[in-house]
C-alpha cells in the first residue's frame, strides 16, 4: 500500500520540495529499534563495538562501492544508534568504471533516502543472520538528517561525532534518558 498521510498519520521530517539527491553533505542519525544497546558499549569514553556494531561499520564502508558518486565522512557507532556524514558528489565529477570492474556499483545518482535504505537493509540482513532472527526489525523506521550547508557546520558535526562517545551519559539517545524523538 502506498503511503497516505490521511491513513498512516506519519508526518515527514524531510524538507518539503528539497532534492535529497543533489550534491551535498548530509549528517544522519539512525537508531536501533527500541533504542536497545546492541551495537556496543562505552568503555573509558570510547566505543567498544559489538559483533553487530562491526557489521554496521562494515556496511557503512561499503556505501561508496555501491553508490558511485557517494563518499562517506566521519561516523561513530554508539551503543544504540549511529551517526554518519554522507557526501553525494556532483554526478558529472564521478568517473564510471567498466561494469566488469565494479559489478556492485549503482551508476544512477542516488538520493539520501536510497543510501540510508541500502545501509539499513544490508546491515539488518547481516545482523539478523548473525542473530538467527530473519525478518526482525533492527533499526527504527525513520532516520534523522541534517543538510550540511557550510564548512563551519561540517567541522562542528565532525567534532560532535568524534566526541559523542565521551558524552554518552548525557546523550538524549542514551537508553536511560527520556527520548526527545
Image (cartoon, rainbow, N blue to C red):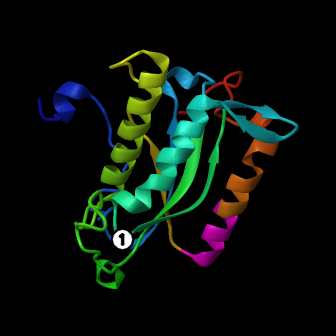
Residue bearing the label numbered 1: 69
Left/right placement of residue 148 relative to residue 63 reads right
Q: Residue at x 39, y 74 (%)?
A: 89
Residue 6 x/y as whole percent:
18, 30
- Quick one: which residue is furthest to the top in this view? 132
Which residue is at the front of the view, 4 or 130?
130
Q: Secondary structure at mark 1?
A: loop
How busy is the neighbourhood of tag 1: few (under 14 within 10 Å), some, or many (20 plus)? many
Question: Where 133 falls versus 79 (above or below)?
Answer: above
Which residue is at the front of the view, 116 or 149?
116
Specify the quadrant of the image occupied by residue 94. bottom left
Left/right placement of residue 6 relative to residue 62 reads left
- Quick one: which residue is furthest to the front in this view? 100
Specify the quadrant of the image occupied by residue 79. top right
Q: Residue at x 47, y 28 (%)?
A: 127
Q: Residue at x 51, y 54 (%)?
A: 61
Which residue is at the front of the view, 96 or 147?
96
What span is colored magenta in the figure? 150-157
Question: Where 110 falls versus 48 (above or below)?
Answer: below
Left/right placement of residue 152 relative to residue 88 reads right
Q: Residue at x 73, y 55 (%)?
A: 162
State the quadrant of the N terminus. top left
Q: Main secondary structure of the magenta part?
A: helix
Residue 151 x/y as whole percent:
61, 77
Residue 10 x/y as whole percent:
30, 32
Residue 87 x/y as whole percent:
46, 67
Amino acid at each position: 500500500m502506498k503511503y497516505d498521510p490521511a491513513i498512516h498519520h506519519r508526518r515527514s521530517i524531510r524538507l518539503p520540495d528539497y532534492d535529497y539527491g543533489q550534491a551535498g553533505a548530509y549528517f544522519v542519525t539512525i537508531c536501533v529499534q527500541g533504542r536497545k544497546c546492541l551495537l556496543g558499549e562505552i568503555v573509558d569514553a570510547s566505543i567498544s563495538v559489538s559483533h553487530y556494531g562491526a557489521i554496521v561499520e562494515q556496511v557503512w564502508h561499503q556505501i561508496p562501492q555501491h553508490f558511485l558518486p557517494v563518499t562517506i565522512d566521519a561516523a561513530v557507532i554508539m551503543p544504540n544508534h549511529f551517526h554518519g556524514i554522507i557526501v553525494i558528489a556532483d554526478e558529472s565529477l564521478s568517473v564510471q568504471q567498466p561494469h566488469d570492474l565494479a559489478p556492485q556499483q549503482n551508476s544512477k545518482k542516488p538520493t539520501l533516502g536510497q543510501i540510508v535504505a541500502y545501509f539499513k537493509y544490508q546491515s539488518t540482513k547481516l545482523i539478523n543472520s548473525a542473530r538467527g532472527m530473519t525478518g526482525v526489525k533492527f533499526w527504527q523506521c525513520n532516520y534523522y538528517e541534517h543538510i550540511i550547508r557550510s564548512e563551519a557546520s561540517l567541522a562542528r558535526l565532525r567534532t560532535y561525532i568524534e566526541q559523542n562517545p565521551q558524552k554518552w551519559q548525557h546523550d538524549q539517545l542514551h537508553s536511560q534518558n527520556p527520548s526527545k524523538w
